Amino acid sequence: MTKIAIIVASEKLDKLFPAITLATTGALSGWEAELFFTFWGLLALKKGYESSGVSGDYQMYDAKLKEALASGAMPGWKTVLEQGRKTGRIHIYACSATLGLFGMKPEDLESFVDDIAGAATFLSRAKDAEVNLFIA
Amino acid sequence: MEPDIVVDARFKSCPGPLIALADAVAKASPGQVLQLLSTDPASPSDIKEWCAGVGHKFLESVKEGDVYAITIEVGG
């Protein structure tokens, strides 16, 4: 089975969207998707966390993006992820080292997180992926 | 061709139209004809690629104004 593996290292909307869009589109196409959230990306997995918006250089587009989300023209990243996860082919891992760095506990993570993992687990899952991305 | 089911995903950006179509296909039966209405200019090629990948038949894409009417047949 075709596989995509993505390291998600940012909680900015302009980084989360491509990661989740590709994972979900892959899953809907019959691919497996392995997503490893690390550093600032891990923040997006925290229960109730709201993204801080778009990346610093592009603040002028922040309102535009939020408007598209509010109107429904652009589905929110969690909605897209939920659709993809219905296939059972998207796996979400939280980086254990960053979890410790932020003083977060497993129970602080959203229910869609499959597991807490380290570098060896990600490498093992990613080694036979045809598409490997680092999004930060 | 008259579709069995019409999926209206107009004014939704990528990946909204594909998600809506995939959702409808999951509930449909093999041989049924579905038509996706989309204003996303990526939809004709995206849906064509998706169909080829997962085994549905891409029938046609017709553009009327800003709307693409994309017709597919659900594979077995």
Image: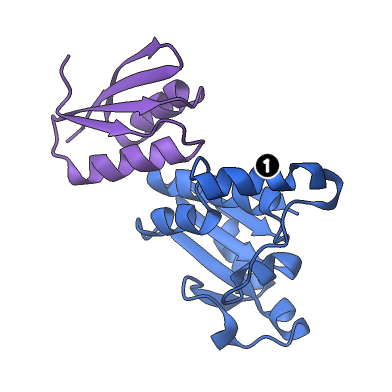
Chain colours: A blue, B purple
Q: Residue at x 24, y 45 (%)?
A: B26
Q: Is residue A39 above or below residue B71?
A: below
Answer whether residue A115 is visible to the viewer in this image.
Answer: yes
Circle 1 is placed at which residue position?
A64
Q: Where is residue A88? Give x, y as percent.
A: 37, 60
Left or right, A58 with respect to A23, comes to: right
Residues A134 and B2: in front is B2
Could you tell whether B53 is left or right of A62 in the image?
left
Q: Which corner quadrant of the image does residue A41 belong to?
A: bottom right
Q: Could one spot residue A130 in this view of the protein?
A: no
Left or right of B39? Residue A9 is right
Of B38 and A107, which appears nearest the observer? Answer: B38
At 35% from the left and 26% from the top, the residue drawn is: B37
Residue B2 percent coordinates (x, y): 15, 18
Identify which amino acid the numbered label 1 is placed on. Lys
Please report the residue visible at 54 percent of the width from the left and 54 percent of the height from the top: A77
